[in-house]
Image (cartoon, helix red, strand yellow):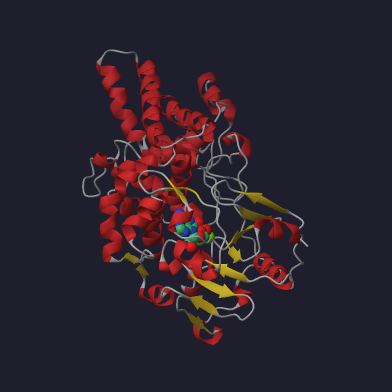
Amino acid sequence: MTPSHTRIPAESHGISLADLSENARFVLEKLHEGGYEAYAVGGCVRDLLRGRSPKDFDVVTDARPEEVKRLFKRARIIGRRFKIVHVVFRNEVIEVTTFRGGDASEVQRADGGMITRDNVFGTIDQDVWRRDFACNALYLDYASGELVDYVEGFSDIHGGRLRVIGEPESRYREDPVRMLRAARFAAKLGFHLTEDSERAIAHCRETLDAISPARLFDETVKLMQGGAGRQTFLELRRLGLLEHLFDGLATWIDPLDPASDWPLVEQVLKATDDRVTRDLPVNPAFLFAGLFWRMLGRHRLRWLQQRVPAEDAMVLAADEVLAIAARKLMIPRRLAEIIRAIWMLQADLERLAPSGDAKGGKSSESELSEDQQALMHAPWFRAAVDFLCLRSTTSEVDASVCESWRRYAPERSERHEPMVEALKPSDFGKKRPRRRPRRRKPAGARRPAND
Ligand code: ATP
Ligand code: MG
């Protein structure tokens, strides 16, 4: 049986191939010329239909990974569970996936129904049922410019609905990360989960605990640094998912209680959203330093009450809190070092705040004491000042303390001056694709390098 579908012509759906990035078009064209089917799919189609600019472009085809690789000069096959091809351009990576096929019996599952291996290729009308939400399952056909819709995704996008394809509970059990994606899309797009898609989350939340801390860390960064981190955090809380990412944090978060951890957490999420919106770089160390800061304070206090010296109390508390965070998320070692440095410098920054009388202008370093100068040269000093100033917005620190250090560590608002120095791939111990800088292309832009 061929599942029924509709083909929506370009004049009805309103998006054109020209809305795709030049590189995405190039990849689609090459596949098409090679005699393969080629579609843009997923978030890019959804975002274009909502009038937003897509974060990235995903392509799907009937060409096998090896066949895709052969078409492009700079392409690499990646993925363990399912092979995909990254076609690499100077500023962008286009992910090319082969249609997934196979029915439920052909994928390998763990006890709870989670898919553990899955490398069966198929056709578009099989691929569509493997996708998560109907709004993410529209295919833009390069050959005709039509949208291919098997799951009434088009009407969901217009109605702002987030609906799991198929039976929600088994789809969440197959891949529990879909619940996190639900929170992310609901927050980012302002969509509402349909009743059964939401209800099933309450029955499946615990399955998230079987996901590897490395994958959960990556997903958490996407959740918090996707531009709607504040709203996503609240949505995760509402859906009862927060405690599966941050152990012991959810009970301390109450948006209605100013004495809870929320005000500082909210500030760090807002600062991150603001930078993402302005297309400025963000570093997860700053984010995690903020999420766990108040927890750190509670642990520190417990040590102080046991008469441990202040400095040792801080070190012990930082060890404990990072160990708690690591139960759920594999925070890369380098990142943990930065988080720790940001935390450790706070007390010194408060204690040694310059009393300066500079009238707004930049002060000279020679006005500082030796201790202050040493502090200024400590690794992650600027990040620590940024964090100190963030704390001052919740009145935890006097604004004058922030201002006095700001003269030596001006706020970074330019692209080349990240809030926290950018991390290198080697900081994570593995290579990861870099964020694509969104530069405006000059009219009549050059042909992509990957030909
Ligand atoms: P974003 O705007 O964050 O890129 P997206 O929907 O494009 O959103 P991607 O992670 O880029 O998300 O995935 C591309 C597409 O692949 C999705 O739209 C969806 O169709 C499918 N997909 C991704 N992850 C899953 C998953 N865990 N389960 C099922 N389908 C998925
Ligand atoms: Mg995408």
Residue 122 at x, y percent in the picture: 56, 64
Judge by depth and name the residue closer to the eye, 62 or 433.
Answer: 62
19 over 276 or under it: above or below:
below
Residue 130 at x, y percent in the picture: 46, 61
Residue 195 at x, y percent in the picture: 26, 65
At x 52%, y 62%, the residue is 101
Q: Quadrant of the C terminus?
A: bottom right
Residue 422 at x, y percent in the picture: 59, 41
Report if residue 5 is visible in the image.
yes
443 over 388 or under it: above or below:
below
Quadrant for residue 444, please give it: bottom right
Report if residue 183 is visible in the image.
no
Quadrant for residue 192, please give it: bottom left
192 over 242 or under it: above or below:
below
At x 36%, y 23%, the residue is 317
Left or right relative to 265: residue 372: right
How many numbered marks are there? 0
